[in-house]
Amino acid sequence: MANEKFYITNAIPYVNAKPHIGHALEFVQSDSLARYYRAKGDDVFYVCGADENSLKNVQAAEKEGISTQALCDRNATAFSDLAKAYDVSFDHFQRATSPEHFKSSQELWGLCEKNGDIYKKKYKGLYCVGCELFYTADELNEKKECFEHPGKPLDEVEEENYFFKLSHYQEHLEKILTSDEYKIVPEHRKNEALGFIKQGLQDFSISRSKARAHGWGVPVPSDDSQIMYVWFDALNIYRSGAPAKWWPADLHHIGKGIIRFHAIYWPAILLSAKIELPKELLVHGYITVGGQKMSKSLGNVVDPMELVKKYGVDAVRYYLLREIPTDGDGDWSEEKFRVRYNADLANGIGNFTSRVLTLAKKAASPFPKGSTPEAGGILTAISKMKSEVATHVSDRKLHEALASIWTLLSFGDRYINSEKPWEMETGCDKQKDVLENCLAILDAAARELAPFLPSTSAAILARPTAPLFPRL
């Protein structure tokens, strides 16, 4: 039987600034899913990239006194470096300034235009550069500010742009989301998208004047005066970044702040272009820092590169995957990190690994032979853990998958404490049986851990002598 195809994408981050810890969270979550399906034997392709054709990139470059291309080159490299530092296994990193992306996005525009869904009109509205989105007055807070970027004034813009007939797809979008033809996880994010649709969809602008865009971006075909709206071209990175055989995407993975674009705009554009829809949209939450939203003004922005340098990649991966619910918001603090590290890594998997391998080495106990007896419910515990991990990954709850692995490790701790192999005669058959059972537990945990903490898994299976996670 041929392997299943699994095409997974990250959101394509803006490169107006260097990465923050929220980007590391999404990278690590997506990477864990990609690794899990690879380990299953599926044919996986994993894409991320750089969203470069935005007005906010132009403004950031002007503020620094450098060219927009120079800013994009520097910051795209920073995101690529972040992925490497976090052991993230992209198959392709697609830049929006690449010639193949320009060509693909212009072809997509042509398909929507051919279907009669693009027209030109004059427009006046309030524009949030941070979101790259026009807002109506009822979508703003009481201070008439964007909820995502409070405190930042909106630009009042009046110009002639091209529009996409989103209103034509109201019923179709409601149908595909309700039926899970395009599945949105978790359920409350699906309800959020459906609620927005039911308010009544309005056509939206998909171009900017060349003057306002400073000539930066993908040119609109047959109209030199206009540049494509960044969200029209950026969403298409999911197609331009992979060979045609991989489409449709099996899973788009994004943050909750950009759900409108992925749950509504993107499928409508694909329906217009008569291109097959992606299968699933996974929406994660945000990371707060010490209970507060990350903000430069508060001075609480966390540098993800510094965390890896200080604590090591798998320790930070573990915190992000275990402490932050895959389907919700979570918090970062040094105190919480140290508690989780010492409890789960140093005293948990680290201590159990050290105890088992040290005793096994003294007893010259071999690897498990695959015939571990049903002693103390060991095979049942291992089987239960594997089944739970599979279910939790399928449900897109990586934090719960890790919890199940740690439940098995706790079971292993209780088993070795009850059997006390250190009190037995060194090398006796009873001791070897107990240690082989412990090794079976350890190896099962390590193999299931591989998608989440790849270096730690490999180290355990290589039988380390040094502590995996020294106490902080």
Image: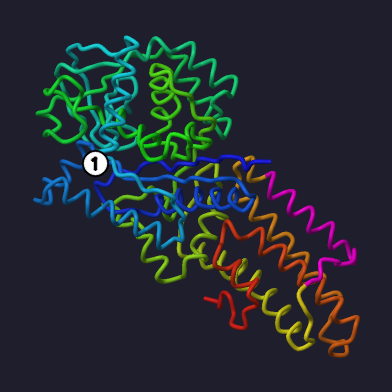
Task: Work out which residue is located at the far front of the displayed protein and give it.
Answer: 1
Is the residue 139 above or below the residue 307 in the image?
Answer: above
Indicate the colouring scheme.
rainbow
Q: Is residue 21 left or right of residue 181?
A: left
Q: Could you tell me which quadrant the N terminus lies in?
A: top right
Q: Which residues are magenta?
A: 368-391
Is the residue 335 above or below the residue 204 in the image?
Answer: below
Q: Which residue position holds label 1?
A: 97
Is the residue 70 above or below the residue 277 in the image?
Answer: below
In this orientation, which residue lies closer to the viewer: 290 or 460? 460
Q: Secondary structure at mark 1?
A: loop
Q: Residue at x 22, y 48 (%)?
A: 72
Q: Residue at x 49, y 31 (%)?
A: 248
Q: Name the kind of residue labelled 1 in the image.
A: Thr
* Residue 353 drawn at (x, y percent): 68, 75
Which quarter of the figure has residue 382?
Answer: bottom right
Is the residue 430 above or below the residue 136 in the image?
Answer: below
Which quarter of the figure has residue 94?
Answer: top left
In this orientation, which residue lies closer to the viewer: 417 or 38? 38
- Determine if the magenta segment contains residue 277: no
Q: Is residue 90 left or right of residue 42?
A: left
* Residue 409 drawn at (x, y percent): 72, 65
